[in-house]
């Protein structure tokens, strides 16, 4: 009797994305991700500093050890019920996969955010992706998203920066 071995078709393994607290070693990768995006580029020092001093309110998304997304945020000292999102970055190859929403969800479930009732951020009028993200985040959390003026164009030193609108999402229910 002739036996024939038939191999089962290979099923592509899903590459799991892990969300975790950043370390200072993540700062350079965050800076590089921003460098290849349309986000405002801050100094590499800013990203390293956020990882060191604000790691409890920052989140990195990694896939097979490679950074594919991040959120930098902080709780303003005078407003303990707010977490201010400074920047969210997602690798262009991963955009559209819900990573930004998952980063925000991970952020607000952190122990450091246990007293947070509002998520705030500033967004330029032309940034459709961020406006959509924050509105969807409010809808998914069954709360409000209030948009108001924040920083006018004339505050910025060059003519190249749009005004910044304030997005306030909440109250967030635990």
Image (spheres, rainbow, N blue to C red):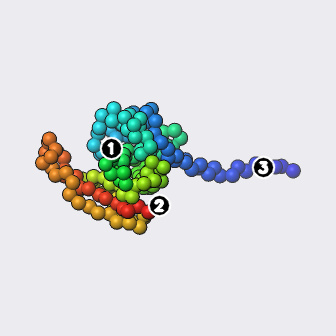
Residue drawn at point x = 30 percent, y = 45 percent: 39
Front-lying residue, 41 or 7: 41
**Comparing marks 1 and 2, which lies closer to the viewer?**
2
Percent coordinates x, y for residue 87 in the rendering: 34, 46
**Comparing marks 3 and 1, which lies closer to the viewer?**
1
Q: Of the two numbered discs 3 and 1 on the same chain, state the one appearing first in sequence.
A: 3
Which residue was labeled with disc 2?
A: 174
Query: Badge 2 local density, few (<14 within 10 Å), some, or many (20+)?
Result: few
102 vs 48: above or below: below
Residue 148 visible in the snapshot: yes
Residue drawn at point x = 38 percent, y = 66 percent: 143
Q: Secondary structure at mark 2?
A: loop
Residue farthest right in this picture: 1
Percent coordinates x, y for residue 46 in the rendering: 33, 36
**Comparing marks 3 and 2, which lies closer to the viewer?**
2
What separation in Å lies between label 3 and label 2 (alpha carbons)? 58 Å
Q: Number of marks in the image? A: 3
Q: Is residue 117 left or right of residue 16?
A: left
Which residue was labeled with disc 1?
A: 37
Which residue was labeled with disc 3?
A: 4
Q: Of the two numbered discs 1 and 2 on the same chain, state the one appearing first in sequence.
A: 1
Residue drawn at point x = 33 percent, y = 47 percent: 76
């Amino acid at each position: 009797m002739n036996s024939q071995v038939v191999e089962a078709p290979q099923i592509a393994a899903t590459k799991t994305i892990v969300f975790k607290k950043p370390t200072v070693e993540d700062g350079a990768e965050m800076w590089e991700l921003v460098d290849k995006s349309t986000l405002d580029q801050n100094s590499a020092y800013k990203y390293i500093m956020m990882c060191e001093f604000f790691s409890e309110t920052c989140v990195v998304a990694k896939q097979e050890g490679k950074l594919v997304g991040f959120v930098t945020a902080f709780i303003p000292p005078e407003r303990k019920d707010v977490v201010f999102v400074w920047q969210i970055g997602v690798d262009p190859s991963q955009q559209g996969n819900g990573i930004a929403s998952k980063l925000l969800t991970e952020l607000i479930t952190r122990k450091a955010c246990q007293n947070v009732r509002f998520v705030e951020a500033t967004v330029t009028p032309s940034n459709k992706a961020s406006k959509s993200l924050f509105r969807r985040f409010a809808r998914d959390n069954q709360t409000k998203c209030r948009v108001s003026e924040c920083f006018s164009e004339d505050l910025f030193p060059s003519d190249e920066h749009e005004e910044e609108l304030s997005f306030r999402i909440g109250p967030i229910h635990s």
